[in-house]
Amino acid sequence: MHARSGAVALLALDLIACSPAPASTDLPGSAFVAIVNASAPDSRVWDHAYCAGLLVAPDLVVTATPCIVDGAAPDVVVGARNLCEGPGARRGVRAVAMGHTDAQELTQLTLDAPIEDEVGTLSPHEPHGQLLATGWGRSSALGSRPCEAKILPLRPQPGVACEELVDAARAAGRLPGNPMCLLPQSASNTCLGDSGGGVYEFSSAGLQIHGVTLGGAGCEPEDPGLYASVEDIQALLSQSDE
């Protein structure tokens, strides 16, 4: 769908790939959410997965708006770490609500039946541990998508590179209300395939949600990525309550 471009042009605001899991492979199944074509059979769900998502309530998923604007309501798969081995918990989408103003880069999907799994908590606080992004994106702009979900460790990226990325997103009209810039802590970056996925911290307190993957300047390890914050997620959810 959308691509993560080079230099400072805002690259992809859809799926992004990750490196092999760091130390934390204990993320609950609810941290793995894929957006798939509604017409895809269970036996070929991997071929038809095109974005990631974030479970914020048993029947609510948040994803990146560019993942949805080009087509009909998708299906959502939750809990499948390997999309080639099975569809996990699959749900249809009965309502789509795109955000505006501060939440313009996010879209809410209402599922036709709830997911029976742990739902993360939106955390307004600075993380105490490692930030982790999940997705099934490519390892490079020209690479192929993996079957198995990756877990990518991230860290904040302040400074000029982040400012340039934010400026590019603003110029393209693709800026969330409270953007975060993050860099990977590994040899791989998020890339085509991970947009809409959650940014988590997992500890004894459970699954904490800190943001949503949007896009970035490229797929190289030194390219900063743009992520929506918890404030942006809360803005989207509050719009649906109006």
Image (spheres, rainbow, N blue to C red):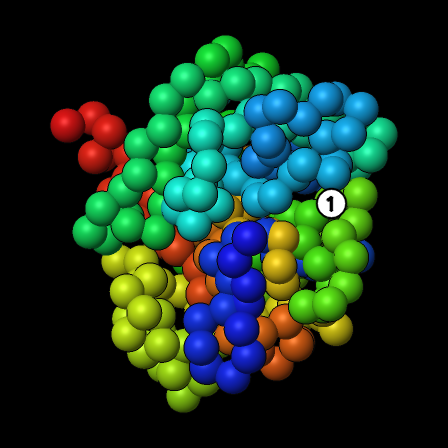
Q: Position of residue 40 (x, y in %)?
A: 67, 26
Q: How many marks?
A: 1
> Dot 1 corresponds to which residue?
149
Please give the name of the residue rendered at 52% of the width and 29% of the height, measured from the top-left corner.
Answer: 74
Q: Amino acid at mark 1?
A: Ala
Residue density around tag 1, few if under 14, some if 14–19, many if 20 or more, within 10 Å: many
Please give the name of the residue rendered at 68% of the width and 36% of the height, measured from the top-left corner.
Answer: 48
Q: Which residue is at the front of the view, 230 or 189? A: 189
Q: In the picture, residue 106 is in which quadrant?
A: top left
Q: Is residue 207 above or below residue 192?
A: above
Q: Is residue 218 above or below residue 195?
A: below
Q: In the picture, residue 147 is in which quadrant?
A: top right
Q: Is residue 222 above or below residue 207?
A: below
Q: Is residue 73 above or below residue 236?
A: above
Query: Is residue 31 at least partly visible in the picture?
Result: no
Left or right for 15, reference 240? right
Task: Classify mark 1: helix, strand or loop.
Answer: loop
Quadrant of image for the C terminus: top left
Q: Position of residue 204 (x, y in %)?
A: 60, 39
Q: Position of residue 55 (x, y in %)?
A: 50, 32
Left or right for 51, reference 127? right
Which residue lies most toward the top here?
113
Left or right for 78, reference 45? left
Which residue lies most toward the bottom here?
160
Q: Position of residue 237 (x, y in %)?
A: 29, 34
Q: Which residue is at the front of the view, 220 or 117? A: 220
Please give the name of the residue rendered at 74% of the width and 36% of the height, measured from the top-left corner.
Answer: 46
Left or right for 11, reference 24? left
Q: In the picture, residue 161 is in which quadrant?
A: bottom left
Please give the name of the residue rendered at 44% of the width and 77% of the height, measured from the top-left corner.
Answer: 9
